[in-house]
Amino acid sequence: MTTERTGATLRILGPLEVEGSAGVVRVPPGRQQVVLAFLLMEANQNVSTDSLVDALWEENPPDTARTQVQICVSRLRRNLADGGVDVTIETRQPGYLLRVDPARIDANAFTAMIVQARALRGEGRPAEAAATLRAAAALWRGPCLSGMSSPTLRTRALRLEEDRLTTTEDYLELELGLGRHHQLVGEMSRLVREQPLRERPRALLMVALYRCGRQAEALEVYRAGRELLIDELGLEPGPDLRGLEAAILTGAAEVRYRPSSEPEPRAAAEPDPRPVAPRPQVPRQLPAATADFVGHDELIAMATRTLTGGADGADGAALGVVVIVGRPGVGKSTVAAHLGHRVAEEHFPDGQLYCDLRGTRAEPSAAAEVIGRFLVALGIPGPMLPDDLAGRVDMYRTLLADRRVLVVLDDAVTEQQVLPLLPGNPRCAVLVTSRSRLTGVPGARRVELDVLRPRESLELIGRVIGHDRIDRERAAASALVGTVGGLPLALRIIAARLAARPHWTIASMVQRLASERHRLDELAHGEMTIRASLSLTHDGLDQRSRRLFGLLSLAEGPSLSGWVAGAVLDDDRRFPSDLLEPLVDVQMLDVAGVGPTGDFAYRYQDMVRLFAREKLAEADAADNAAALRRVLGGWLALAEDAHRRVYGGDYTLVHGRAPRWRPHAEHVEQLLANPLDWMAAEQENLCAAVEQSAAAGLDELAWDLAVTVATLFESRGLLDDWERTHTAALAVTRSSGNTLGTAMLLGSLGTLHLSTGHATRSHESLTEALGLLVELDEPTGLGLCRRDLALLARRTGDDDLALELYGRALTDFDRAGDVVGRATVLTQRAHVLATRGRIEAARAELTEALGIYREVRYVGGIAHAMRRVGQVQSRSGEHDAAVRTLTEVLAMVRASRDVIGEGHLLHNLGEVSAAAGRLAAARGYFEQALAVRETIMDHRGMAVVRADLAAVLAGLGEPGRAGQEVLGRVVTGFADGDPIRGEHAAAAPAFEPGR
């Protein structure tokens, strides 16, 4: 397939090309090309003149910049009209809007083909899906907008470039599954050479080589990649690549090709009737292990036996629990990470759960919150989590009953934190670190972690500074070890300081450390040693690094992103991690891991953070407060940008006046290439930022950030975080008299309570919010409240009131110019119209809503509207069309990992098939829906599906199974409570797009 076959005549996937009725239209290079390219990338959306000025002049635009933009637009209009190009450029305050059929832009054709391929893959047609993806990749004629000099455009093109790479990897993986490994080796090798740090193409090449009988070459590809990752990033390959190497070494069945003829494409209404249970998620949450770990051999061996006894099927039926106890700086967390990685893959293949229980912080983590995070990591959607601790414990232990999982609980402070987190299955194991002995944890093996022995201490220092320096000053090195006292944290800090100063002798360091210790001799021995080590290193840093070291401790989250360093110093450089590397080099900061975008995350050791806070207290309080506002404003700016990318614009949200701090534009593009994944990776930091804003009395920041981050809470079902952050923000907006913030938080809480089926609480919050918003006359907020109140009215069966509220919400959103808000109302109202038999009216509203969603590229909205289209088609008796539509939506929700949505779509497909009389197909869909609901422990949903499955089984002549196996369970399921908690409660955001 080529661009011409797609009908695209406006091309940005390569050099800019424009084609009209008279042929190719020449757009003069320079400003006209930049302006046109920018308008094409924002086609059918309003683009401000300021944005175009920024694209043309990154810095210091001339006084005539706006006039020059007007001239460019005028010439473009004439040029495009002369060439017969069917587009218009409208003047629309505060800038311009390029109106065009989206299908005529090659980038839109590319996106549409990817969506089509996902649907084909969901239908079990991998060959067609691969061909479609290859055709999509063939639309590219080179780098996006190649030849353009505008940095602004280049950053916008990066997102499309990433999609191009992912598309290539997707079709290679599909074709590999079809047995085309011999044909693909060359193409895969080229991709690995072009993208040497991407692990997925390397894994595909390894599998292809192995299946071609070239095992040694496959392993060499792994080794070359590992060496490159270590040299370039200082990181080991990820668990998937490591697991693949092990599978190839052992000849595991999963990497061998098993030829099978691809089934002929069947009618959409005739699926494979066999149920397919979703694979359980395997969390890999262990923090990075320390590369230069030494010592504690006896402790490691003993703890390994305790942890793996049950996992390996030993005679004892007791859960293996190890509690590592020790003073600050002795290396408890380091030992736990090392031990966890040592036993994880071989003994606990079903996953490793990790949580920092924050025992040294003012508010340690609560058990209910930790279990909630663990359940989500294990694949349970947030809306399925029980509200109470006891219910969560039951679900947690049930989920782990047949798995081998290692649970690592770092920095526990009390038994009450730990006891609910103990699995009931003895094949699991628990590793705890604490400064207390935790004698109330039953059956735990407690081990005291002591300091390193002199020989081990010398080995640790030698690994950092080189053994040759140790050999040259053996006596001084031994004296240094004696001065430091074998504390690993102090040893690492001192060794890093020596490594950074190769001209210093070890003897001089001994003298410096002894002098510093004497100054601090009022402290306890261990604390004194660490502080002395820190003081020496801190005083040797340059002024900027010393200031950065203290300011970074302002952030309350569990990890530090690189851009935070830029924010505290008010430095928006492109690579902000460069600011942190001097602190990493001297062990004042640790690298905690790598995020989904390749950006590093950092963290303090607890004692180091306390020291940083002390240094911060010596600095100017006003400067510290300004730095904190920049950091919190940075979280707000990034969250706001992420929301905008998810919804295709700044829709369904109201913002306040809080100042933003924006990292470098190219860094933002890297971070937010997948906005929801970024938000999920930063979930704890975002929540901490909301709570810190509230605690600091920054009401504007607190409420704006909270309601913006609700994008993440709603999409991933993080209901605990939703309520916790909003409660904290609401307290500060009420106390400060912030009416708008209070109203928006109440409205968002109303949506939350709607999601959890708490109708009374939802109505109270929404009604109070509505009253405040009427006083303020805030149209977007009014539209959101009235839309959710309409859904509440539908729950009580009052469709007349719902339609009235929907009508008023439409007026609100139209007044605000919020097209996505309008589309959400149209989508919801269409369902009411369809149930009343007004099918054509429902179709018209869904058609308009789909048009809006597609124009702004809001994928969640598209999925929700298409599901409603499928239901309308089913009501009209268009069963084949309904199955095709719902199957496409099923592929979309599977691609977005929306397991609740998957269960709903499979159930809907079963209903349509049953209505069409295709009982075998209906049975297959219902059994698959049941498997999904069982995986996420949705008992109410299981009861609903089993009721429909029973009717189908009876129709297929299986009354015994229908009555005994299904209906008996239905009774149990309904006894558990109301089987349907409402659309928000059981539906993923793809079905009820909200904020």
Image (tube, helix red, strand yellow):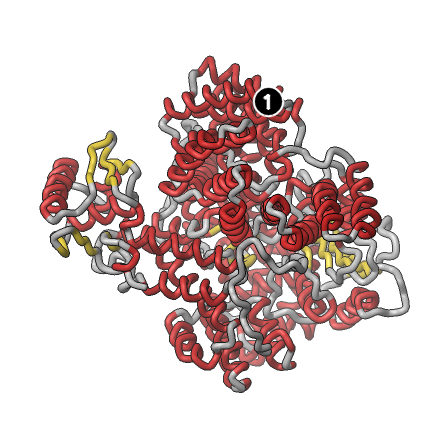
Q: Dot 1 lies on which element?
A: helix
Task: Name the outermost residue toward the top.
Answer: 775
The percent position of residue 396, horizontal first and vertical second, equals 75, 49
Q: Is residue 380 above or below residue 805?
A: below
For label 1, the residue is 793
Left or right position of 289 against 225: right
Q: In which quadrant of the rendered image does the N terminus lie? A: bottom left
- Percent coordinates x, y for residue 280 in the rendering: 67, 58
Across and down, in percent, residue 775 comes to 46, 13
Question: Would you say residue 885 is visible in this rendering?
Answer: yes
204 or 929, nearer to the observer: 929
Q: Nearer the viewer, residue 738 or 697?
A: 738
Left or right: 322 in relation to 486: right
Q: Is residue 150 above or below residue 203?
A: above
Residue lying at 84% horizontally and 51% vertically, measured from the top left: 441
Measured from the top left, where is residue 533 in percent x and y?
58, 58
Q: Which quarter of the picture shows residue 353?
A: bottom right
Q: Which residue is at a point 51% across and 56% down the rendered structure image?
A: 595
Residue 948 falls in which quadrant of the image?
Answer: top right
Residue 280 makes an appearance in the image: no
Q: Residue at x 66, y 31 (%)?
A: 757
How many dots with numbers?
1
Q: 10 Å neighbourhood of mark 1: few (<14), some, or many (≥20)? A: some
Q: Is residue 58 left or right of residue 332?
A: left
Name which residue lies at 22% across and 45% down: 59
* 612 in relation to 736, above or below: below
Q: Amino acid at mark 1?
A: Ala
